[in-house]
Amino acid sequence: MLLTLQHLGKSFGAEVVLKDINAAIDKNDRIGIVGENGAGKTTLVKLITGEYDADEGEVIFAEGTRLGYLAQNSALDQRETVYGEMKRAFQPVLDALREMETIERTLAVRPDDPGLLERHAELSAVVDAADGYHMDVQIKKVLSGMAFPPETYDKSVAVLSGGEHTRLCLAKLLLSHPDVMILDEPTNHLDFDTMEWLEIYLQGYSGAVLVVSHDRYFLDAVCNRIFEVQEHGLTAYKGNYSAYLPQKEAADALRQKQHDADVAKAAKLEDYIARNLVRASTTKMAQSRRKQLEKLEITEAPSNQHTAVRLRFEFDVAPYLELLTAKNISVTLGGKKLIDGLDVLVRRGERLVIAGPNGAGKSTLLRVLDGKLRPNTGSVRLGMGAKPSVFEQQQLRFGGTVISAVWDKYPKMTELEVRSHLALLGFRGEDVFKPCSALSGGELARLRFAEILLERPNLMFLDEPTNHLDIYTRELLTQALMEYEGTIVLVTHDRYLMNQLACPILYLEDGRAVQYPDFDTLMHRHDADAQPAPPPQPAQRRPAYGKEQRRVRAQLRADIKAAEDELEALALRVIELEGMLGDPEVTRDHKRLQDVCDELEDTKFHQDELLEHWEELVQRQEELESEAE
């Protein structure tokens, strides 16, 4: 065994985090550590690495075992280059090579010195053990896998982005070849190709791997054991995450059955004691049952914490068919063209995933589509009846409490209603009075979803919605999004979520946007037979007869009337805006004049689009009437 945990326990003040943890880790183990946020996963890792001292028990390493740890905020030398930082992973080898050169120069003078020969052999063993003579080959191989091409080798560590910094920390750790490698959320900031490379690398790794991750795909691809941290304890399961789930379910069912049997037995004993204790003939038997009851240990029921969060997104008003239309949009930031001449059409009830490597412009495109950022060229329109909600990647809140965040927006709700609603998202008891500034990333995300549930949108713009959520809440959110009947446009790198939504994926890379019909096609996009999705075509309606035909015709009449009303309102607005262009107060204010011109252009563009839509509706109405005749 490389590593053994014996009766490990840790508390912070009066709060017990871990208690009586026992586990053994062998060379070929690939262990995924899972659990809810706050369950103690990070505490367990810090006990193993020595960052925390255990209150009880001990961590035992086999002699000579080397430990490597990738924390979420690992540090690098800001003065180094990318390649120089990687060479530091071979520092013992570099030191050995330098000393060997010195010894070799001395041996040229004293070739038979036994002490020098012995030291040279020791140093040579150090170099051979690390395959130091192929150091550059190893560095280039790992840098390539971590998406660092040769042109980045001389790049300063100080100017790396957050994602590049994380990838370089991981690359450096891989090169150090520890016997036990501990990784904390290693897939953060990795694109699909890099994730796949890392999964293959870890599958063939010669040491043990412990990984804290909420990425179900990663846990399935890499792990052969799962450690679940729950209720201060640790339970080990065989297999990957998908194998763990049915085992967990079966164990919980058995535990619940035993709990119910113990409770029933205790009730039976209590009833017997109550009926027979006062009767002289049965007093001794009743006293015997009382002793049995006192010794009886009732098995604790399985926790239902995993289902503490309940999500169901609903909306009140169905919008028009073409809900989101973007035409010929282009965006340039910092001199880099992120999006060029892109057309996007999302209809009512459809879902669209925006994916791509870090820095490709995914969040920027989402901000353009939700209206927070104006494109350099082109236009974005929401259809009539759209009621959008936006989930941003970073939830920023500086004041107030959890309960005030909701109550201030919906003051007509009673305190009981607000607290009951927050309980759906896991905020119970005194949690509702926590200051927003003290919330974790996962808690902030859950609070925002509590607001979205009340907003009842028919269109959701979501930017990395599963970030910061534990693996169980991720699955509940995934299920809720699958059941949602509204329209979703989201940015994500969560492969499980993408696959479950089973929708088109718009992949951004190097200023290009390619739409793939589903997740599998995206994952095999480098294969020769993988083809992007064809442009979306209008849905073909089946002929309608009888009651269905009357319903369709009535809906068409209503749609035509609504389009005509909106066209009339747009025409009035055009007249109003054109009049403003002759107003001296407007013409003297450059910014206001520009805003009026922009709105006039947008309104006329919308007029043209709506007129085209109205013509299609009228044509469809004529076709139905011909069929009816």
Image (spheres, helix red, strand yellow):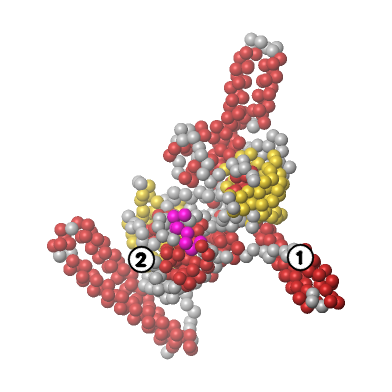
- Element under disc 2: strand
> Label 1 sits on what residue type?
Glu
* Closer to viewer: mark 1 or mark 2: 1
Residue 560: which numbered mark, if any? Answer: none
Residue 253 against residue 337 in the figure, above or below: below
* 613 is higher (above) or lower (below) than 37: below
Residue 442, percent from left and from top? 51, 57
Residue 433: say if magenta: yes
Q: Residue at x 51, y 49 (%)?
A: 189
Q: Position of residue 237 (x, y in %)?
A: 70, 55
Q: Which one is earlier in the sequence, the residue at label 1 or at label 2?
A: 1
- Magenta range: 431-438
Locate residue 469, reporting x and y percent: 53, 57
Picture residue at 58% right of the left edge, 50% below the top = 13
Query: Is residue 366 visible to us here?
Result: no
Name the image quarter holding residue 174: top right
Q: Nearer the viewer, residue 81 or 328?
A: 81
Main SS category, magenta section: helix
Q: Is residue 529 left or right of residue 125?
A: left
Location of mark 1 (residue): 294
The answer to whether residue 605 is left or right of residue 192 is left
Residue sitting at the far top: 109
Marking on residue 381? 2
Q: Residues within 10 Å of mark 1 (few under 14, many from 20)?
A: few
Residue count near mark 2 (Cα–Cα under 10 Å), binned few <14, some 14–19, many ≥20 = some
- Asked if residue 622 is among those painted magenta in the image, a careful observer would answer no
Image quarter in which the C terminus is found: bottom left
Which residue occupies 58% across, 39% down? 173
Q: Quadrant of the N terminus?
A: top right
